[in-house]
Amino acid sequence: MQNMVLPSTTSEATEPLIKIQNVSKRYHNTHALQDISLEIPRGTIYGLIGPNGAGKTTLLRILAALLTPTSGQVWIEEQEVTRAPSIIQRKVGYMPDFFGVYPDLTSAEYLEFYAGIHGISRQKRNGIVADLLELVELSSKRDAMVETLSRGMKQRLCLARALVHDPEILLLDEPASGLDPRARVELRELVRTLQGLGKTILISSHILLELAEMCTDIAILQNGQLVIAGDVEKVTHQLGGGRQIDIRLLDKARVTDTIAHLEKIADIHNITTNEDRLIQAEFTGDDEALHHILAALINQGYPIVSFAPRSGGGRLEEVFLNITERSNQS
């Protein structure tokens, strides 16, 4: 399989925060990772997408200095991870894909315990715990036993645990797994808030729609190998053939001649319609070209009600299914 790494639009202005260089991890005869190279820009929400067994958790654990790669190097700023694990673990907050069992602790005691592990003084712990519980909207559960919390609450508490030492980087392994729709929305909003606070976030999942709505950049892994990486829109465009646009008309009678107009445009392909005045098409140009197409339609009197790219999640899911199927056949 040939890896494709696209340049990220977010990384042009600054040096990447994380550099992963030719990293492999082998367990006996099993290759969990094979020659992975990635650059993670500072301040991004970077998604690791792949089915179970793709190597996502292994890569996150290497970044957290919990595993040593068989070969290759990982740099976080000027520090090589294997040479300075204690320094790296002060910079990184890791949220595993399982919560663990803490039957005898309240939410506050749970965070105080981890604050102590990170060497935070007792004088500072109370304030930090209170701030984190407020951030993850669990202040009302401060004295509740951890085992009584819902799955979504436990996920948010686990995220607070990863933040207890105010790390620069967050590594979130399948954080939305098992959550109901409302809890997923709450988690997504929280992740965006953390990005706004200056955190760089790596988040793994096989729930593609979640990452499409949340991430600025993605890397797709399959069988321990990197398939493609880069800006979400560029990845979708490169592998999916283009963006999907939805054009809704006011007058059903104008659908046919609108389609005839669109068929003459070089950047428009695969035009379809339905009985609800909606035209769907694939677009392979840039944003400026898309603007000109819309302006021309309006100027020529086509009754446009709405004109917009389709939600990126569906396209990303199509891309993922296409390339993983292609990888399995190779």
Image: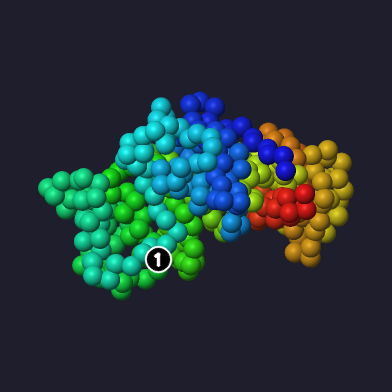
Q: Quadrant of residue 318?
A: bottom right
Q: Is residue 277 above or below residue 6?
A: below
| Residue 49 shows up from this direction | no
Q: Which kind of residue does numbered mark 1 sit on?
A: Gly
Q: Quadrant of residue 187?
A: bottom left
Residue extending farthest to the bottom is 148
Residue 119 appears left or right of 229: left
Residue at 80% in and 59% down: 273
SS at circle 1: helix
Residue 76 appears left or right of 139: right
Task: Give the percent coordinates (x, y) of residue 178.
Answer: 48, 67
Residue at 73% in and 50% down: 327
> Dividing the image into 4 quarters, which one contains the N terminus?
top right
Residue extending farthest to the left is 123
Task: Give the percent coordinates (x, y) of residue 97.
Answer: 45, 59
| Residue 102 shows up from this direction | yes
Local crowd size for mark 1, using a 10 Å CA cut-off: few (<14), some (14–19), many (≥20): many
The count of marks equals: 1
Provide the residue designation for mark 1. 152
Of residue 27 and residue 210, the one placed in the foreground of this image is 27
Of residue 13 and residue 99, the one placed in the foreground of this image is 99
Q: Is residue 291 above or below residue 157?
A: above
Residue 231 appears left or right of 243: left
Residue at 80% in and 43% down: 268
Q: What's the image's color scheme?
A: rainbow
Residue at 32% in and 39% down: 86
Task: Give the percent coordinates (x, y) of residue 299.
Answer: 75, 40
Task: Give the percent coordinates (x, y) of residue 196.
Answer: 39, 42
Of residue 244 and residue 293, the one placed in the foreground of this image is 244
